[in-house]
C-alpha cells in the first residue's frame, strides 16, 4: 500500500520558498479584521501524504487509504509529533517541546519542521493576491460536488501561483495558532476546506477551530512549514 520513499530527497524537493509580505485576516464571529507581517519561510508543496507519514511514524490512521492521499483523521497533537519526529530524523532541532499534562512549548525560530501559522497559511494560499480563491473551484479543489465522497491523491488539481497544491479542498489543514484562548481555551485553528464541504466553506479566509488532543476527522490533516535560512 505504501511505497518506500527517500525521505530526505522527498522533503527537500517538496519545500517551496514563500516570499515575505503582509496578509489581512478576518474573523466573522467577532467582526474583526487585522493585518499581519509574514517573513519568508518554506511550505510543503502538498499536504503531508500517507506514504510520508507512514515512513516517519510507522503507522497511517487515515480513513481513506492510499499512499498519495493526504493523511487525515489526525489530531493537532499528532501533527506536531510528526513535525518533531521528522525533524529528529533529518538532524534538525524540533520546534515543539512536550511538557507535563500535554503542555506545549513552541520555539518558532528553531530549524526543524512545524505547522504554519494561520497568517502564513492564508498568505501562502492566496499567493500574495488577497483573493478568496486562486482559481475556479472545480479546477483547484476537491470539495463536496466533485470529490466522489472522499479524499483524492494530492496534486490532482491546479496549483496556485506559487506552486502549492490542495491549499483549498481535499482536507482542512491544522495551523499552529490557538484560536481564542479566553473563549475556547487551547482550541487550535484549521484552514482550507475539505472534500465534504460546500463551495461556501472552501475559501482562503474561512477559519475553523477545535480541540488539539481529541478532535480528529476524515477531512482534516496538515502540511509542514520550515523557517527560511535554517
Image (cartoon, rainbow, N blue to C red):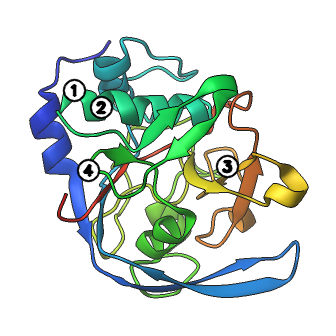
Where residue 48 is drawn, which disc sits there?
none
Toward the viewer: 161 or 178?
178
Q: Quadrant of residue 129?
A: bottom left
Instruction: Tell which residue pokes out farthest to the front in this image.
Output: 100
Q: Are marks 1 and 4 in contact (CB under 8 Å)?
A: no
Toward the viewer: 106 or 208?
106
- Of the two numbered discs 1 and 3 on the same chain, state the one appearing first in sequence: 1
Q: Are marks 2 and 1 in contact (CB under 8 Å)?
A: yes
Residue 204 visible: yes
Q: Quadrant of residue 131?
A: bottom right
Q: Are marks 4 and 2 in contact (CB under 8 Å)?
A: no
**Helix, strand or loop for disc 3:** loop
Q: Mark 3 points at which residue?
A: 144
Where residue 86 is drawn, which disc sits there?
2
In the picture, the quarter occupied by the C terminus is: bottom left
Q: How far apart in space, not on screen, are marks 4 and 2 (Cα)?
A: 12 Å
**Helix, strand or loop for disc 2:** helix
The x, y position of residue 34, in whole percent, is: 67, 86
The x, y position of residue 3, in whole percent, is: 22, 18
The x, y position of residue 191, in whole percent, is: 61, 57
134 over 69 or under it: above or below: below
Q: How far apart in space, not on screen, are marks 1 and 3 (Cα)?
A: 37 Å
- Of the two numbered discs 1 and 4 on the same chain, state the one appearing first in sequence: 1
Amino acid at each position: 500500500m505504501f511505497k518506500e520513499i527517500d525521505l530526505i530527497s522527498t522533503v527537500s524537493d517538496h519545500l517551496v520558498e514563500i516570499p515575505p509580505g503582509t496578509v489581512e485576516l478576518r474573523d466573522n464571529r467577532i467582526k474583526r479584521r487585522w493585518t499581519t507581517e509574514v517573513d519568508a519561510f518554506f511550505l510543503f508543496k502538498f499536504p503531508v501524504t500517507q506514504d510520508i507519514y507512514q515512513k516517519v511514524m510507522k503507522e497511517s490512521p487515515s480513513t481513506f487509504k492510499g499512499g498519495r492521499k493526504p493523511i487525515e483523521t489526525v489530531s493537532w497533537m499528532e501533527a506536531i509529533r510528526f513535525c518533531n519526529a521528522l525533524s529528529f530524523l533529518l538532524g534538525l532541532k524540533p520546534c515543539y517541546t512536550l511538557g507535563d499534562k500535554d503542555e506545549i512549548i513552541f520555539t518558532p525560530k528553531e530549524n526543524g519542521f512545524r505547522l504554519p501559522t494561520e497568517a502564513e497559511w492564508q498568505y501562502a494560499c492566496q499567493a500574495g493576491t488577497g483573493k478568496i480563491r486562486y482559481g475556479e473551484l472545480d479546477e483547484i479543489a476537491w470539495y463536496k460536488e466533485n470529490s466522489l465522497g472522499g479524499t483524492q491523491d494530492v496534486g490532482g488539481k491546479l496549483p496556485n501561483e506559487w506552486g502549492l497544491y490542495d491549499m483549498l479542498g481535499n482536507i482542512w489543514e491544522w495551523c499552529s495558532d490557538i484560536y481564542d484562548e479566553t473563549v475556547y481555551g487551547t482550541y487550535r485553528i484549521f484552514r482550507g476546506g475539505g472534500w465534504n464541504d460546500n463551495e461556501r466553506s472552501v475559501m482562503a479566509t474561512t477559519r475553523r477551530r477545535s480541540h488539539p488532543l481529541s478532535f480528529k476527522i476524515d477531512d482534516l490533516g496538515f502540511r509542514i512549514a520550515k523557517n527560511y535560512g535554517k
